[in-house]
């Protein structure tokens, strides 16, 4: 079972629910995300990060294509025609950075922000190095949505667990990347501790 049927059910349910019920559902999703660690520190307070009830679900083929092109952007292993498409929205500073890109091949974690045009084609808008903890935030948001919305449409625990597994884990992929760079055998690195400091924003 994929996420697509859940998305369809959620949209149908949300359309029929009164505003106060939708608000309650949104709060439940946000609270679940908080329990998984998705908060931001403002002053001396941990604040929730509200989640949308209707995230865009990207199909596997599109996700694979964007992942392939993200790796190409990072390594700059593109043909001239590909480069014009992928780097079209980069500014002058980013274009200069591309001129000396050899060290980028050793990056463990990075993110390409895609601009999607009216035809559905993706173009590289930004290339960012992100903090390792961000992978855990991504996982917390996705898991909170799948668990809360899955329960809302009546899915059983086994089905929800299967969907969580099928959705994958950014944190596990980060571990795999670190292990690959370390030169150690995967069996020697079965877990990963991500440390962070509290920082007001």
Image: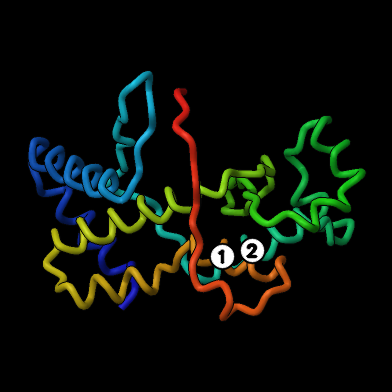
40 vs 74: above or below: above
Q: Residue at x 15, y 45 (%)?
A: 25
The structure residue drawn at horizontal position 34% and vertical position 46%, both measured from the top left corner, is 37
User: Residue placed at 49% from the left, 60% from the top?
Assistant: 171
In three-dimensional space, the C-alpha distance between marks 2 and 1, rounded to whole angstroms, equals 5 Å
Task: Tell me if 65 is positioned left or right of 77 in this view.
Answer: left
Residue 27, quarter of picture: top left
State the residue lying farthest toward the right.
99
Q: Is residue 181 above or below residue 194?
A: below
Front-most of 112 and 8? 112
* Residue 38: image location, x then y, percent: 35, 43
Q: Residue at x 51, y 73 (%)?
A: 190
Q: Which mark is residue 175?
A: 1
Near mark 2 (Cα within 10 A), the count class, few <14, some 14-19 or many ≥20, is: some
- Residue furthest to the top in view is 43
Q: Which residue is mark 2?
A: 178
- Residues at badges 2 and 1 in contact (C-beta under 8 Å)? yes
Residue 96 placed where, x, y %?
88, 36
Left or right of 159, for residue 179: right
């Amino acid at each position: 079972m994929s996420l697509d049927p859940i998305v369809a059910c959620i949209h149908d349910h949300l359309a029929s629910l009164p505003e106060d019920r939708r608000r309650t559902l949104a709060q439940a999703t946000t609270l679940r995300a908080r329990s998984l660690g998705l908060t931001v520190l403002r002053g001396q307070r941990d604040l929730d990060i509200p989640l949308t009830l209707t995230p865009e679900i990207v199909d596997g083929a599109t996700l694979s294509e964007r992942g392939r092109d993200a790796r190409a952007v990072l390594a700059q292993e593109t043909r001239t025609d590909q480069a014009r498409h992928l780097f079209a929205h980069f500014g002058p500073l980013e274009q200069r950075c591309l001129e000396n890109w050899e060290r980028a091949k050793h990056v463990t974690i990075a993110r390409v922000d895609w601009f999607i045009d009216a035809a559905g084609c993706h173009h590289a808008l930004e290339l960012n190095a992100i903090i390792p903890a961000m992978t855990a935030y991504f996982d917390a948001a996705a898991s909170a949505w799948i668990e809360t919305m899955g329960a809302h449409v009546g899915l059983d625990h086994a089905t929800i667990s299967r969907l969580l597994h099928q959705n994958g884990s950014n944190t596990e992929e980060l571990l795999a990347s670190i292990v690959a760079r370390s030169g150690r055998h995967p069996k020697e690195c079965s877990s990963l501790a991500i440390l962070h400091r509290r920082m007001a924003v």
